[in-house]
Amino acid sequence: MIEKAYKLLAIQEKISNRAAKDLIDRGVVYSSGKKIVVARGEISNKTKFKIEKINKPKIIYENKKIVAVDKPAFMTTEEIAKNYKDFTLLHRLDKETSGILLFTKDEDFHEEAVKAFKNREVKKEYIAVVQGRCIEEVTVNKPIITIKKGNTLFSKTADEGKDAISHIEPLMMEGKISKIKVTIETGRTHQIRAHLKSIKLPILGDTQYGAKPYKRVMLHALKIALLGYSFESKEPHEFGHAMNLG
């Protein structure tokens, strides 16, 4: 017999159908080592599931002006913002991207911070595990255009797009897998993902941009500095594990 994946998961985990569908949509449900990606897909009723644990967001710094939160993968920025309703969100990270997420507590400081982002006075440093051999530093200076289809956003390099600059530095290489550092001057939607795809170094797990499936999109917001503040989020352990795939 066959059953829809989310219904079978709900039965096995003794949770609601809605909660089961949410887990699959987040990308944290596996069977036989493979991620279940279609909640309504039909599978054998003998299928056994494994659910990856989602870490909780945590505040790593807070004062009267600014709050730095360590964002886990598999949670949207909007979900995290609901947990901190007294703070004002300053920027966003994609759902599967982990790392530093900033909020402000003071209105005047928020305006200063927004200006700093607009004036490119914020230093943002990411690490990523990518498919391919990255053996030298490279700067990608290619405009990006973002297309919206339903609830999905997709960015690509195009002459008619908005200017976007990413600086890439190799950190480690194992076979055909590389760990890299990416420093961005601009903050376009999916900028790093689109730029890395354009130089044939797609981020591991980023199937939307042509990479092989993995546990998650292997992108982490490591450091961010603005207006005299500097914050850092520890590299997740799965980044080391991913290098073993090389």
Image: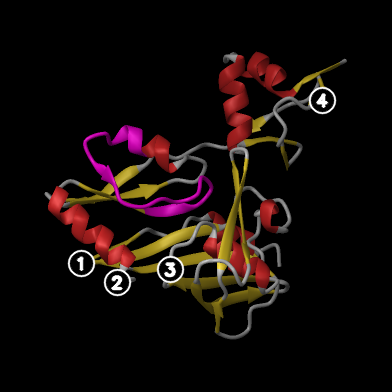
Q: Nearer the viewer, mark 2 or mark 4?
A: 2
Q: Nearer the viewer, mark 1 or mark 2?
A: 2
Report the Cα–Cα distance between label 3 and label 4.
Answer: 43 Å
Report the Cα–Cα distance between label 4 and label 1.
Answer: 52 Å
The magenta segment is 81-100
**Res 121 label:** 2
Residue pictured at 34% horizontal, 33% vertical: 82
**x and y, in percent, of residue 149 in the image:** 64, 43
Report the Cα–Cα distance between label 2 and label 4.
Answer: 50 Å
Q: Earlier in the sequence, mark 3 or mark 4?
A: 4
Observer-nearest of 245 and 27: 27
* Disc 3 packing (10 Å; few <14; some 14–19; many ≥20): many
The residue under label 1 is 227
Q: Earlier in the sequence, mark 3 or mark 2?
A: 2
Name of the residue lying farthest toward the right: 1
Q: Earlier in the sequence, mark 3 or mark 1?
A: 3
Three-letter code for the amino acid on which mark 2 is drawn: Glu
**Left or right of 90 in this view: 52:** right
Residue pictured at 62% horizontal, 69% vertical: 196
Q: Nearer the viewer, mark 3 or mark 4?
A: 3
Residue pictured at 61% horizontal, 63% vertical: 194
Q: Secondary structure at mark 3?
A: loop
Question: Are the residues tagged 1 and 2 within 8 Å (C-beta)?
Answer: yes
The residue under label 3 is 186
* Disc 2 packing (10 Å; few <14; some 14–19; many ≥20): some
Q: Earlier in the sequence, mark 2 or mark 4?
A: 4
Q: Secondary structure at mark 1?
A: loop
**Res 43 label:** 4
